[in-house]
Image: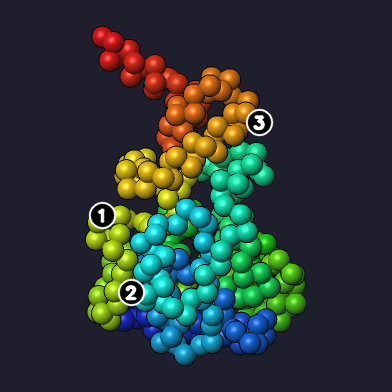
Amino acid sequence: MELDMDLTKKIDYSISLLRKCENMALEMDPENGFYLAFSGGKDSQVLFHLAIMSGVKFKAHMNLTSVDPPEVIRFVKQHYPDVVLIKPRMSIYDMVKKRGCLPTKRVRWCCEEFKEMSGAGKVTLIGIRREESARRSKRNEVEMDNYKFRGSFDQWSEHREKMVTCVGGKDKIIVSPILYWTSRDVWEFLSSNDIPHCSLYDKGYKRIGCILCPMSNYKQKIREIRDYPHVKRNWIKAIEWMMENKWTEKRLADNPEMAFNWWISGKSFKQFYADEYLQQKINFD
């Protein structure tokens, strides 16, 4: 599929993919069909409305993490009341105690604990796009989360029956109907269909996922600290617990504020301290 297709063709292609995959979804969940992973963000909105336009059977779910922007939750409750909100069995701060470490870009146990287990044993619809990152640029429109298969629907259909029977209790088939869409396509679709979006986008937010997500850039994290100061306080409490019970990095053992600053920086200990030293030297000079 070419990335320069116009939006009308992309809509038709996405709807066609949904319809092709529906029998597979119904085989795995006759009652609900597709498991649609919803976040309240613009991409999941497009996914939701495409599913409606295609006429396929689906049930939308949103996994809460305890660090969700309140504006997003209010938006979903108001505009998407049929979305099932799944509350976490424990807060992300308590999960730190269970896991014994903070979530980072390299060790993203937060997604594993709060999102990735949902949709097990079903065909899950997700709103990722290749344009978003180098990692996502390698994703395929139909995949199995256990990496037994990655490719197109046509490739899948050649041995679909065998692959469906291979899906275990925790496995799932992942379908990405807007994989080839651009951000411009997404906004054009929402605008042309008069679909409202979360107010955070109008305030300059580019992504509206978890507050202080390890995958967010540093600039956004600083903004989120300003907009949601309670989240910083809760993370510092979690860090204090880590220092008392699990922390092994002696240089941060008595300074929770500095430990927090290191964590949101996304840097290694070595790079963080080198930059701190340089900044202090500049300030002193």
Q: What colour scheme governs how the chains and residues are painted in the rendered image of this protein?
A: rainbow
Alpha carbon distance from label 2 to label 1? 28 Å
- Where is residue 78, by image quadrant? bottom left
- Image coordinates for residue 210, horizontal then vertical, percent: 45, 54
Image position of 89 with respect to 7: above or below? above
* Residue at 60 percent of width and 43 percent of height: 96
Which of disc 1 and disc 3 is earlier in sequence? 1
Q: Is any part of residue 1 visible from this angle?
A: no
Label 3 crowd (10 A; few <14 / some 14-19 / many >=20) = few
**Is disc 1 surrounded by few (<14), some (14 to 19) or many (20+) residues within 10 Å?**
few
> As shown in the figure, which amino acid type bears the numbered disc 1?
Gly
> Which residue matches tag 1?
204
Q: Amino acid at mark 2?
A: Met
Say which quarter of the image contains residue 34: bottom right
The residue depicted at 44 percent of the width and 40 percent of the height is 233
Q: Position of residue 45 (x, y in %)?
A: 39, 73
Q: CA distance from mark 3 to mark 2?
A: 55 Å
Query: Is 267 in front, or is 135?
Result: 267
What is the secondary structure assignment of the residue under circle 1? loop
Q: Say whether disc 2 or disc 1 marks the residue closer to the N-terminus.
A: 2
Q: Residue at x 30, y 55 (%)?
A: 205
> Residue 1, labelled with which disc?
none
Residue 5, which numbered label? 2
Q: Secondary structure at mark 3?
A: helix
The percent position of residue 262, horizontal first and vertical second, equals 46, 31
Q: CA distance from mark 3 to mark 1?
A: 39 Å
The local secondary structure at tag 2 comes to loop
Residue indicated by mark 3: 245
The x and y percentages for residue 226 are: 32, 43
The extreme bottom residue here reads 55
| Number of numbered tags placed on the structure image | 3
